[in-house]
Amino acid sequence: MMITSGGPRNSSPGTLNQIFFDAVERFAKPDALQVKRAGRYEPISHDTMLQRVRRIALGLGALGVRAGDRVAILSENRPEWALTDYACLAIGVTDVPIYPNLPSDQVAYILRDSSAVAIFVSDAAQGAKIAEARASCPALRHVITFADSAEGADRTLSALESAGATPDDEDRRAEFKRRALAVKPDDVATIIYTSGTTGEPKGVMLTHDNIFSNVEAGCAAIPFAGADTCLSFLPLSHIFERMAGHYLMMRTGTSIAYAESVDTVPANLVEVRPTLVLSVPRLYEKMYARVLDSALAGGAVKKRIFFWARAVADRWADATLAGHAPRGLLAMQYGLAQKLVFSKLKARTGGRLRYFVSGGAPLAAEINKFFYAAGLVVLEGYGLTETSPVIAVNTPAHFRIGTVGQPVAGVEVGIAADGEILTRGPHVMKGYFNKPAATADAIDADGWFHTGDIGELRDGFLAITDRKKDLIVTAGGKNIAPQPIENKIKTNKYVSQAVMIGDKRKFPVVLIVPNWDSLEKWTRQQNVSTADHAQLLEMPLVREKMEREVLGEVQGLARFEMPKKVALIERDFTVESGELTPTLKVKRRVIDARYKTIIDALYASAEHEPETAGH
């Protein structure tokens, strides 16, 4: 087994409560958090946070919630999420975050499995899910809403805070802090239910020190300026946002501004002008597609300038990544390219961005290089819920496109004989809640966690090639890693989503959801009048166009990797339909089963075609 390490851990075991109290005392900022109300962003200070966290925690205590109990949070990102989380941790309660887009039956499963005694909900709509599920959740005693009205809940957060507000004297404040700092590093801080691309969700038990160690490693990996602002929009239910966009930002004194929603991110970027943004690849894919679309939609001069600037930036990136400092003509051309083209892209991010961070799924190398060349660095990393989450990350000092960086401090990485990535260290979960057999399957006797991902080490940098369970093995015994091929296809402006199918079949095919904005613009140029998506997908003109675009992106693949057929799907795959996990990973088996008729028709039609070169 090949092994590499991020070096020794750079901190003693600790707790998330230490992070919170240290930040309040060290930074004492007026804008620890920011939230948009009545059309503008308003600050919330560290002092206000501490006061409200204490009142929520004591209010929970007044309801009879005790250390070791589980309390769920079902809400979109907002200040109350953060306050409730810190309040639970302060009294030794294990909190259970739930994705706000989950339907009521899946919410009920998590509440039952975790035996949650209370749940915080953001509003009446989330409260309605609990009302529907409550009869099947015998442990659930309290429903608390962040809304002003108690509709769909037992009480409001405001009422809970009032119950914990008195008496508010020096002795009580000191006792609250003492109790919070008495929580032990090995105590379970949170149970996060995995997305479940296969099988039912499992509750991942993460201790205070699991996450604390990852926060400290993150501090060492990425330089923080001391006056940073982060825009938070990935779900706090996800460990990536929870560790990096929540605890790490608190630890470094970074102001956290909450986006109003995922849809408003472009506008909120300009309003907040963040210096740090964490996202999954979907954001970068959309930004890249929008830039390309804008360039291609312009006149001949605008198009020529864009592609000249892109070629110059590409040469600059190659030189810089090779360790050279571009000078002379290239440096002058790059300065002009920045002024004419890339300054506009930077302006859309607010104009102050120091780093993007990408995680949750693989980012296409082509997109990463485009942003780097434009002067917007995307630090791609890798991890899982079970690893708190970061295993490796690219840093400004150690940066290599096409990899997810080097292991962070305290983390070991091994590559098993079959290519599976293994990891060991303080970041590895305590286990799956109430599932000792599943825990034993995941963590071996030597403490190595088996990630289920396939990868390789390149000079100490980790590269991910695919999910072990996602590998397509054709009827001829050829192994195909679909994710890199899908990512390549998704760089095309006419493609929104792409899923490869082909396990145990003669060859792979690909299901494509078009980018309707781009495709409809093209059809109008072809004088095609219908706006009905289903009708458009039946037109030979459209089908041939999409096939050309898709297959044009994958030229150069091995013959057995090339998708032989393309099927067009009218609507996006979604979380609500069960086709994507809450972290937007494709449930390949669900797609395969749901579109079986379409897929079978692709293979049937191929049986009647002559074999051609390239297939």
Image (tube, rainbow, N blue to C red):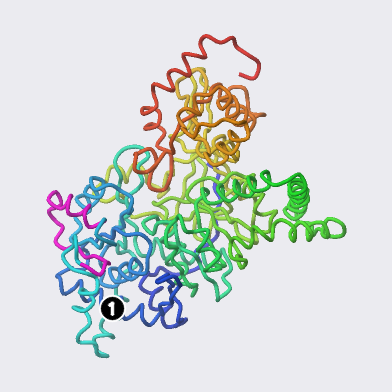
Q: What amino acid is labelled 1 in the image?
A: Arg
User: As rendered, which of 130 and 180 lies closer to the eye?
Assistant: 130
> In the drawing, does residue 52 fall left or right of residue 333?
left
Residue 502 can be seen, yes or no: yes
User: As rendered, which of 336 and 54 lies closer to the eye?
Assistant: 336
Question: 123 above or below 446?
Answer: below
Splitting the image into 4 quarters, where does residue 389 fall? bottom left
User: Magenta segment range?
Assistant: 126-149
Q: Which residue is mark 1?
A: 54
> In the drawing, does residue 141 fall left or right of residue 420?
left
> In the drawing, does residue 378 fall left or right of residue 76?
right
Splitting the image into 4 quarters, where does residue 341 fall? bottom right
User: In the image, residue 218 lies at what x, y percent?
Assistant: 51, 63
- Say if the magenta span includes residue 141: yes
Question: 253 above or below 221?
Answer: below
Residue 418 can be seen, yes or no: no
Q: Residue at x 75, y 58 (%)?
A: 340
